[in-house]
Image (cartoon, helix red, strand yellow):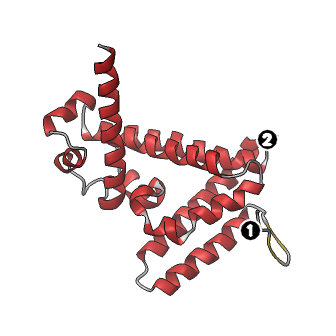
Amino acid sequence: MRYRKEHKQATRQRIIETAGRRFKEDGIDGSGITALMKDAGLTNGAFYTHFTSKDDLVATTIADQLQAQNASIVAHAQPGRAGLEQIVRWYLSPWHRDSRDVGCPSAALLDEIGRCAHPTKQAYTEGVLAVADGIAARLAPGDPLSVRPMALSSYAMMAGTLQLSRALADPQLADQVLDQGIHNALALLGIEHEGGTRTVH
C-alpha cells in the first residue's frame, strides 16, 4: 500500500514537471492534456487520477515552478546582498534566455497567467511573493517587508527584460538588452556604485 502511495505521488510530480516544461515552451493555451500526458508517458485517463481539471494542473504547476525557482536561488546564490548580483546575472544570462523550457515561469507565462482563473492567480501570487521575499531578505535582513515593493519591481524588470530579449530577431541587440537589464536591475537594488558595478567573487 505504501508503494502505491509513493508511486502515485511520483507519477503526479512527473506530470507537474512535464507540464511545467511544455507550458513554458508552448504556452498554457497551446498545451492540451493529451500532449501533456503523452510527454509524461501516460494515458489521458490517468490524468483525472491526479487532477480535477486542466485549471487544477495549471495552478499546481505554477506553484511548483516558482517554488523550484526559489529553491534554486537559495541553493546557488550567496547569502545576503552579495548574492543579489549573482541572482541578477543568472536571471539575465543568455543561457536563461535561450532555455525557456527550464527557465522562469514569469518570463514565459506572465501574460497567460493574467488571464487565468483565480486559483492560478492566487498560486502565482503566493509563489512570486516567496521569490520577492527572498530578494527582500537579502536587501534588508532586519526588515524585509519594507523593501518588498522594490524586490517585486526588480523581479518584474528582469522578467520583462528577458521577455524582450527572447522576442528580438537580432542576436546582438538581444544581448545588449540583457546587458542593459543587468545594469538597470543592479542600480535599482542599490548594488551599483559610482565607477562601475561591484563584482561578486
> Mark 2 packing: few (<14 Cα in 10 Å), some, or many (20+)?
few
- Three-letter amino acid code at the position of disc 2: Asp
The image's mark for residue 133 is: none
85 horizontally vs 23: left or right: right
Residue at 26%, 55% in the rendered image: 29
Amino acid type shown at disc 1? Ala
Quadrant showing the N terminus: top left
Residue at the spot of label 2: 143
Q: Which residue is mark 1?
A: 187
Residue 188: image quadrant is: bottom right
Residue 157 sits above or below residue 65 on the image: below
The image shows residue 174 at horizontal and vertical percentages of 50, 80
- Percent across and percent down for residue 141 are 79, 43
Question: Looking at the rendering, which quadrant does residue 13 occupy?
Answer: top left
Picture quadrant where residue 41 is located: top left
The x, y position of residue 167, in whole percent, is 41, 75
- On the question of residue 121 being in view, the answer is no
The C terminus, quarter of image: bottom right
Seen at 78% across and 63% down, the residue is 190
* Extreme residue toward the right, this view: 194
Q: CA distance from mark 2 to mark 1?
A: 20 Å
Question: Image check: 88 left or right of 127?
Answer: right
Name which of mark 2 and mark 1 comes first in the sequence: 2
